[in-house]
Amino acid sequence: MSPRTNDGEPERELPASGRRSEDTDSVADAGAGAGAGQDTEAKATEAAATDEPVADQTVADEPVADEPVADERVAAVRRFAAAGRRRRVVELGVCAAMLAVALTAGAIAVGATHETRNTPVVTAAAVTPGLLASADLGEGITALQAHLRAQPRDFGGWATLGLAYVEQARTNGDPSRYPQAEQALKRSLALRPDNDQALAGRAALAAARHDFPNALKYADQALKQNPYSERALCSRIDALVELGRYDDAARAADLADERRPGVPVFTRYAYVRELRGDVTTARRVLDQALNSSTTPGDIAYVATQIGQLAWNQGDYEDALTHYARALAADENYLPALEGRARAQAASGRRAEALTGLENVVARFPLPGPLVELGELYEARGAEGDRAKADDQYTLVDAWTALARANGVNADLDTALAAADHGDRTAALRAARAEWDRRRTVHTADALAWALHVNGKDAEALPYARRATATGYRNASFLYHRGVIEQATGNAKDARTHLTAALKLNPGFSPPGARAARTALKALEAAK
């Protein structure tokens, strides 16, 4: 499973049902620490009624797509991947762009109808953000599209639609939704400049695309308009974490807890503590968040966060218990399905894990589960498993290219997957580029490992040490550091960190755990 950051799955976005009740206590209170023209409009209207795409829209008349069918999206990615990952990079990019267009071919425009008034309107009660929280996200988007055909100057409705697209991209793994989200948010701002809903939406979109400087900028702009914007407060924490500004992130989490205590803030507060090695507080805050969760979306979201925290500490039974609770609330919640499969594999239930991950990637071919499935095939080693594993790694390349075609910075995904299962030179190039943009424990670890697989261990060691410097308890980081220390002649430190990795989470990765045990045997034999 990918780290619990905006770099991978699950991205740390606000869940669709992330509103708090009025009597929610803060973390601090709970004792867990401080807290166009008309012609174009007519064409768009006609297209909206017939579900036909509209080309050459202006910013004010952006197209909004119906939800792509999951099977069609997966098939498109798989057809693209069949071209093979050894094609030239430029060809790959062109194919990805074509795929992105194909995925939005059913777009309809709901942004322009004949409208005699020039005054922006407020969102109708029937399509408030609460609808997206209480109903199926797809149904909420459909309702918003219908509303915006009738009220195209509703800046709040456009902001909500943009946020819904960001959420849908996150939950469905469909980056083609991001350009649509951007269009809707731009429309909202064109109607009402500086409205905090749209600015907070731009912050969330930037974070989802891994553009964290802009995520921080838009969050700050939104908070100037509305200091109590929950979305902006949360996106600000996310951006600071993903920029490696952990002290600032802790202060931002305290501020958010004071202003808007509730599930979205609690989960981010807990993650900031976890990054500092304070697992006890992180778990206490997550338990509080789960106890205050009332909607299926919140329950699934928070229970999965607890499962991932337990997984990181090697407590597979606790992880499985919380993944089960998440799936009882939402049987299709992707992070819980992925997490459950990984915990099953670590518990020796490989057949169940394989079946689970095969079902996940059949619907959502995302990098995290694709790599995990490939590694499980390799670990099983049955006839044809090597080819099956290679197919999964090729699909990672396809998704990465698609993500880039839709404005997502995918360098960290490239570095993590390619270092072990692809082009090592490309992995190092991507890791260096990501480190230049942001300096976090995750980018330090990715750069260290990419340097190692390229034979640059002396250069890798300082980055491996930096990845573990905050106290963040991550077995993969410890394993990477131990291997690099072994390669640089630091045998004692290597034994310490390899042992710590296996003690913390002995099933952190099928190939990684096996390699760690092999390295320890070699170190003991050389004593």
Image: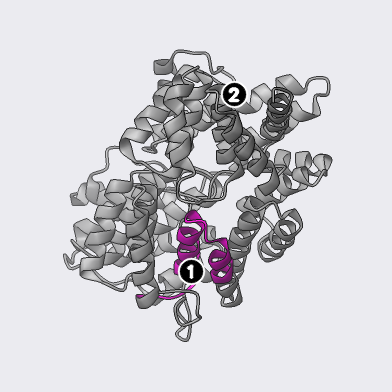
Q: Residues within 10 Å of mark 1 (few under 14, many from 20)?
A: many
Q: Label 2, on which residue?
A: 421
| Residue 468 position in % (x across, y down) | 49, 44
Q: Label 1, on which residue?
A: 266
Quick check: can you spot residue 52?
A: yes
Query: Which amino acid is tagged 1?
Result: Phe
Going from N to C along the chain, the mark reached first, 2 or 1, is: 1
| Residue 435 on the magenta span | no
- Quick one: 68 or 209, which is closer to the camera? 209
Q: In which quarter of the image is the N terminus?
A: top right
Q: What element carries label 2?
A: helix
Q: In the figure, 24 relative to 93: above or below?
A: below
* Left or right placement of residue 453 versus residue 432 in this view: right
Q: Residues within 10 Å of mark 2 (few under 14, many from 20)?
A: some
Rendered image coloring scheme: one colour
Q: Residue at x 45, y 74 (%)?
A: 33
Residues rendered magenta in the picture: 259-286
Q: Residue at x 70, y 35 (%)?
A: 513
